């Protein structure tokens, strides 16, 4: 009798946890509270990860995969309160003459975090020149995200970029 009761309680707990693990919302995209924190030119020594990824997310300083040193994050830890905020960084190939501006950041119920970034040419003479081979990575943008605006930690990162010559 005790075994049956224990099995019923265990089955009930498993069913409750399975129901709680489902989608939290039927909406396809949820707005995320964000702030474009910084942007700039990429150091010529920058190299992406082995998989050539150019989009990075970190919820702590420990999640740096060799890209943060190219930004001001390690030098200004007080500006990045990782208890409340995370960062989403995007690096672009090219060279100076372009600026990147974040238009939106959204989260899907499946844990996909996506950003829309506009890359504009602010100096046509620089944009017309071919990039130097030694500096194939040109600019970056860092986005600070309020963790409380996320439903769950992101599983996948996406970036849509609109270029303006």
Image: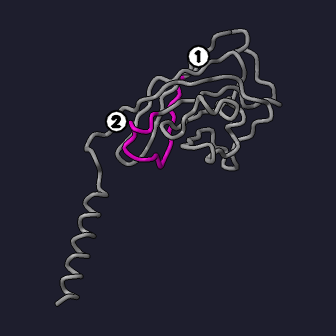
Along the line of sight, which residue is nearer the eye, 74 or 136? 74
Quote the CA–CA distance across marks 1 and 2: 26 Å
- Residue beneath disc 2: 30
- Residue beneath disc 1: 120
Which image quarter: residue 124?
Answer: top right
| Numbered tag placed on residue 107 in the rendering | none
Q: Secondary structure at mark 1?
A: strand
Image point 20% across, 88% down: which residue?
A: 2
Q: Is residue 158 magenta?
A: yes
Callout 2 environment at 10 Å: few (<14), some (14 to 19), or many (20+)?
Answer: some
Q: Is residue 79 magenta?
A: no
The N terminus lies in quadrant: bottom left
Residue 73 position in % (x across, y down): 65, 32
Residue 85 position in % (x across, y down): 50, 36
Q: What range of the chain is rendered magenta?
A: 146-162
Which image quarter: residue 94?
Answer: top right
- Tell whether 98 sits left or right of 58: right
Which image quarter: residue 130?
Answer: top right
Image point 31% across, 40% down: which residue?
A: 28
Along the line of sight, which residue is nearer the eye, 54 or 58? 58
Q: Residue furthest front?
A: 78
Query: Mark 2 or mark 1, which is nearer the start of the sequence?
Result: 2
- Tell whether 10 sits left or right of 42: left
Image point 46% across, 28% down: which residue?
A: 34
Taking 129 as reference, is 132 above or below it?
A: below
The C terminus lies in quadrant: top right
Taking 52 as reference, is 89 above or below it?
A: above
Residue 132 position in % (x across, y down): 81, 25
Q: Nearer the viewer, mark 1 or mark 2?
A: 2
Q: Residue furthest bottom?
A: 1
């Amino acid at each position: 009798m005790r075994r049956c009761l224990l099995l019923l309680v265990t089955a009930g707990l498993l069913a409750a946890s399975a129901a709680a693990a489902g989608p939290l919302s039927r909406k396809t995209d949820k707005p995320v509270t964000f702030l474009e924190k910084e942007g700039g030119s990429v150091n010529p020594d920058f190299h992406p990860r082995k998989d050539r990824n150019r989009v990075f997310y970190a919820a702590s300083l420990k999640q740096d995969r060799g890209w943060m040193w190219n930004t001001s994050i390690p030098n200004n830890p007080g500006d990045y309160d990782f208890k409340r905020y995370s960062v989403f960084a995007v690096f672009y190939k090219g060279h100076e003459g372009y600026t990147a501006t974040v238009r939106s950041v959204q989260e899907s119920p499946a844990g996909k975090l996506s950003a829309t970034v506009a890359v504009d040419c602010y100096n046509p003479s620089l944009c017309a020149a071919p990039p130097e081979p030694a500096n194939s990575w040109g600019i970056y943008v860092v986005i600070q995200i309020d963790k409380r605006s996320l439903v769950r930690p992101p599983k996948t990162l996406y970036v849509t970029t609109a270029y303006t010559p």
